Amino acid sequence: MLIPDNLFYTKDHEWVKIDGDNAIIGITDFAQSLLGDVTFIDLPKIGLIIKQTKPCATVESVKAASDVYAPLSGEVLKTNNELTSHPELVNKSPYESGWFAVIKMADETEKNLLMAPAQYKAYIESSQKK
Amino acid sequence: MQLIFEKSRVGRRGFQLPETDVPEAFALPDKYCRKIKACLPEVSELDVVRHFSNLSSRNFSVDTNFYPLGSCTMKYNPKFTEKIAVMPGFADLHPLLPQLLGGGMLAQGALEVLYHMERLLSEITGMAEFTVQPLAGAHGELTGVMLIAAYHKNNSSLKKHIIIPDSSHGTNPASAAIAGYDVVVVPTDKDGFLDMQAYKKALNQETAAVMLTCPDTLGLFNSKIKEIADLAHSVGALMYYDGANLNAILGKCRPGDIGFDVIHLNLHKTFATPHGGGGPGAGPVGVCEKLVDFLPVSRVIRRIDGTFALDYRRHKSIGYIAPFYGNFAVILKAYSYILMLGKSGLIEASENAVLSANYCLARLKDYYKPAYDKICMHECVLSASRQLEQGVRALDIAKYLIDKGFHPPTIYFPLIVKEAIMIEPTETESKETLDVFIDVMIEAALLAKTNPSALHLAPLTMPIGRLDETKAAREPNLRWQP
Amino acid sequence: MNYISHTELEKKEMLKVIGVKGIDDLFKDIPDDLRPKSFNIPDGKSEFEVIEHLKLLARKNATHLTNFVGAGFYDHYIPAAVDALASDPKFYTAYTPYQAECSQGWLQAVYEYQTVICELTGLGVSNASLYDGGTALYEAAMMAVRFTGRKKIIVDSGVNLIYRTMLYAYTSNLSIEFVETPVVHGQSCREDIYKNLDDKTAAVIVQNPNFFGAVDDFSDIVERVHSKGALAIASVYPVSLGMLKSPGEMGFDIATGEGQSLGIPLSFGGPYLGFIAVKKEYIRQMPGRIVGATVDKDGRRGFVLTLQAREQHIRRERATSNICSNEALCALRALIYISLLGKVGLEELARLNYEKAEFAKSVLDKVPGVKVKRSSPTFNEFTLQLSKNADEAVHRMIGKGFACGFPLGRFYKGMDNYLLVAVTEKRTKEEIVNFANSLEAALCS
């Protein structure tokens, strides 16, 4: 299970990469492995204001549709159009070419609610024991 | 197998229309006419007959295979009902005839069928009145929720949500949401019943209704059902009965007597009308006294002189939910079936359906983990969780059954049971059939231990193997391209 | 007869395996106070008795009248092969093809049906069918509401009143605003549609041919609708598509309709066939089942139910619709019907309907007290203005052996003297002439 060191994580298995005032978001390797083959991604519209912990995208597989929750609040600046024609990128490369969107962060302090890599690793392990 | 389009040959014809006997008319102005012609097959009648005859043989069906698809009640569909539905007096009847002045007398037979069917269903279920208009079970649900909304609106009570158990059919929350309600989901307790504590917490003055299936989707009868209904009524909420599982309790218990206010039935389940490869069904809705005024128009009424008529003067009605009087040909078949079985036949249907389901459960529970190990109603829910330890999933077992000539049970429903396998044998299957099926299920359980890959490869006897569903969803190919 | 094969002995054996004494033990979870208060159902009958009873009821229905009633539901000839093939129990006693490998027959048939609907409508994607033309139109309206996030819908009053009434019933608890625009001289009033069209409009709904039988080219309306970011929806009559400009050619986003005229008997109102086709970009908003082609691991073509993440069994309260079935057997009938007629046959059928109706118009125009409304071209149905109340005329014509049409005053205020007459390929020249003569007599007396 890949958990890169330079990212932050949520309990709903989204990741965040902080880049100055902006944040790049996506779903984790663990999330994509649970979902199985991703068949479609409904991305937020550019310009949309998303709110931390509220749904901002949907990921579909053959037998499931799952919400993706915004890890941080902010305005959507850019979305990954490649995912429209190649949803499999989320499975193949969840942290690189499978990114979802770039947002302009509205509130820096929200970062405090995210998990560091080690924390996230422990979180997955404990949830799997259940 | 080739598509009918791929069999097309330019200039070939499959049907001849009568020669025109009227003078040629002025052509319709060009701007109204299509420029791009529809690319339809050009085939002979024999091409068509052979194509569809060969296609049909690529289906499992009740007439050819045991079809224990849980929750769908795939019982035998008696042939005589087919004969009735195509009688010209019914099949050729234009639905607008009784809406013409004096036209009611032109459709007395059809109106009588509808009138009597509504009375029969009311008596079978203990409801005050029925409408046979809804065109399918889910359509009945939507109609039912619309009736609930109309009732609350009429009482000026502000209701916002509908309570639904997590074990429900997906149509329940979907119908509630589409009619404008929020959905509050209540979990199932360790015994397979509605979690009473969570239910009481969810229930309040804003609850419009509680939607339940009884027996529930786990095949169990909740003996606390009356208490659940009383609690709902105490906050002014109505009780909705999803009739998908009525086949278990005919003559044993009636939703109306329990305190359900609105119910829908699936004629294609309990009353043996064919499922038609996915439809047409019919989803009649019954209501208690206080909801009668809201039923959709038109209503079939009986006049003092014994004739039947359509009544539209119902100002509280929710309006038109179907173009006419329901899926009439389907209603006809179910009506004929009820007349044929009569009181004792209906009771025997339920008794034998429940007997067969329990027999399957008793013989299989040592091999598959029962979701709940107790007497079930008309269907039993097992789990392939033990098999999963060997890497064998419910899906693999299903595919193995196909190779052995059985349509698989429902799998992965209810969602709350891991690797669910839901078996509904119905009353019309013989003990021999059940025994052969059970033996194959046991064989699959043993194979899961000894040779799991044999299950992963199934089915091997069909025209095609397991299909790539991911490809189908990622690169949708939904029509043939010329 | 109860169709149960368990013998008494077998029942005993089964009860023993279960470990209970009697059948009643299986129902012990039902408390005593919940047992039926009554169950007054008549005793069962034999097959012969039930058939005789139903024969008697069937005879109480008048199917001997020469039919000129349409109003959205048409009396077309059904080739024998349609009945023969659709009554194959290997089709009609199967269920929704959840298990693809043992349901390829149905899945392929639905894929072929979807192709037919796309070809007829000129649009990219069809689903596996819906209940009827009215619920299909409702689903289309809801698609537009979801897609645009707007809540105002403009409905042309040339759309069948039955469908409009259904739309309003289904949406009565949702805050959707409907604006009805009038039909002037038989055609949709552009001025009124444009006046109401704004950036809050989710969709404009029209019907072709409209309820009065008039055909139109809606390309201009569609263009204006798109300029406001709304969706254009057409309800269409499939037989007319053998001849008339398709919704796709006019630029519509969604086409729906009633497929009854494609080989499905009138059967007093059902079962019928709702069809819906949309432009590809709206596919994720589509309600209902959809079949797609794919391959197995050996590369063989096969068909599956696909794009299921839209549907209620997965998405529950957030599904695109609550529908979990389709009208498969009716869709099969339509597919067989279209396959028999073929490319040329459907065109000929449409032309025959058009020509017979044009002939009827010319004959009826000469009847004293009858005026054919000729403000716009029609397909196989048209409006007559009578010198008398149309209800009365219809009543008298029943006595003369004709179901002579639908009185428009039933649906439209101020149109008590108007009659809607449909002429299909089944009506002969002789029947049409007799119809005109009888109408003349009915209007004179």
Image (cartoon, coloured by chain):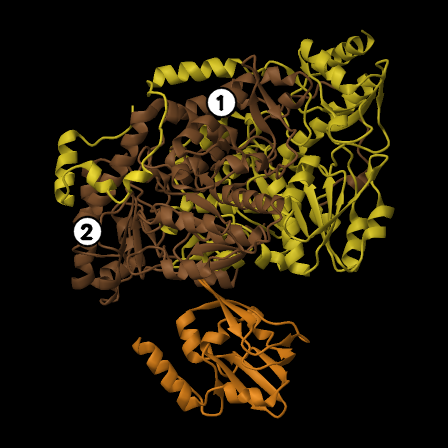
* Left or right: B93 as drawn, with respect to C436: left
Q: In the structure shown, which secondary structural element does the residue marked by tag 1 occupy?
A: helix
State the yellow chain.
C
Q: In the structure shown, which secondary structural element does the residue marked by tag 2 occupy?
A: helix
The disc labelled 1 sits on which kind of residue?
Val
Q: Position of residue B74 (x, y in %)?
A: 35, 39
Disc 2 is attached to a residue of which chain?
B
Depth order, front residue of B163/C372: B163
The disc labelled 2 sits on which kind of residue?
Leu
Going 86% across and 32% down the picture, which residue do you hit?
C375
* Left or right: C428 as drawn, with respect to B128: right
Q: Position of residue B88 (x, y in %)?
A: 52, 19
Depth order, front residue of C310/A130: A130
Marking on residue B364: 2
Disc 1 is attached to a residue of which chain?
B
In the rendered structure, the colour chosen for chain A is: orange
> From what the image shows, is residue A21 above or below residue C76?
below
Asked if labels 2 and 1 share a chain, the reply is yes
Going 86% across and 35% down the picture, which residue do you hit?
C185
Specify whether residue C123 is in view. no
Depth order, front residue of C118/B373: B373
Marking on residue C224: none
* Left or right: C23 as drawn, with respect to C57: left
Q: Residues within 10 Å of mark 2 (few under 14, many from 20)?
A: some
State the brown chain.
B
Q: Position of residue B450 (x, y in %)?
A: 16, 63
Query: Closer to the N terminus: mark 2 or mark 1?
Result: 1
Residue identified by numbered label 1: B113
